[in-house]
Amino acid sequence: MAELSDAVGSERISRIIGYKIKAADFRISSPNLPQRIAVIGQANTANQGTLDTDAKQATSLKQVGEDYGFGSPIYQAYRILKPQSGDGVGGIPIFVYPQAAAGGATSKIVEITPSGTATANATHTVLIGGRSNVDAQFYDIAIEEGDTAADITAKISDAVNAVLGAPVLASDTDYVAELETKWKDLTANELSVSVDTNGNDAGITYAVDVTQAGSGTPSISGALDQFGNIW
């Protein structure tokens, strides 16, 4: 065996200590120590057909998006627990208990109707759930002088769909931009939509109307059955 070099003093050598979190009963010794985090939430409508409702440990935001849908309630919860900037909950394991949509559930649909012809260049912003962006991808609309309602509805649709983690999908006609939540559930009703003209309306006004309310509540009994005695 080769002799270890003493070229670097022992006081300058870093050491790493790791602790692997396992299921145990810490109620007495450390009652506030989290062992794992459970996320019970719904997958997007587009992911329902291939949804595996077995619990699964989430390892990245990308994996959560691919498995349960980008912008889904599960996705939104995970990006809060493990934000792109910062460590979030650190090394605490996160387990997802995905929910299938309830039978007959509906999504929330909101229509944005712009009126007028743009009299100047401006930047308007769609606010979804009170947010102007998701992970620095903004819902900004570049208004150009002369833009008509048809131009603006197309720009709204493009701006929203360009945000990967947006909780809605957008479509447009010559008169209306339609935003529909990516999942079907009563919780979709909590999602607000508005337009901020950022102090310069450029001759454009916006009407925002809810044309369909979200409905349906999935049963979480299957998720609770999987808890067993781990929790």
Image (cartoon, rainbow, N blue to C red):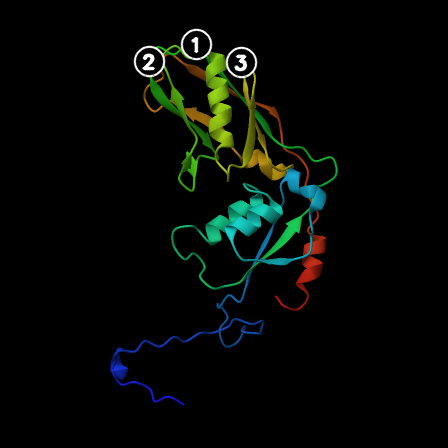
Q: In 3D space, how far apart are the residues under numbered discs 1 and 2 (Cα atoms)?
A: 12 Å
Q: Taking 159 as reference, is 94 left or right?
A: right
Lower sequence index among marks 1 and 3: 1
The label shown at residue 120 is 2
The residue under the point 52% across, 71% down is 21
Q: Is residue 128 above or below residue 66?
A: above
Q: Residue type at mark 2?
A: Ala
Could you classify mark 2 by the number of other residues whose Cα lies within 10 Å: few (under 14), some (14-19), or many (20 or more)? some
What residue is disc 1 on? 116
Could you classify mark 1 by the number of other residues whose Cα lies within 10 Å: few (under 14), some (14-19), or many (20 or more)? some
Determine contact: label 2, label 3, CB under 8 Å.
no
Quadrant the C terminus occupies: bottom right
Q: In 3D space, how far apart are the residues under numbered discs 2 and 3 (Cα atoms)?
A: 20 Å
Q: Residue type at mark 1?
A: Gly
The residue under the point 52% across, 45% down is 76
Lower sequence index among marks 2 and 3: 2
What residue is disc 3 on? 175
The residue under the point 75% across, 39% down is 103
Q: In the image shown, does 18 or 3 lie closer to the viewer?
A: 3
Quadrant the N terminus occupies: bottom left
Residue 41: x %, y % from top left? 61, 48
Q: In 3D space, how far apart are the residues under numbered discs 1 and 3 (Cα atoms)?
A: 11 Å
Determine contact: label 1, label 2, CB under 8 Å.
no
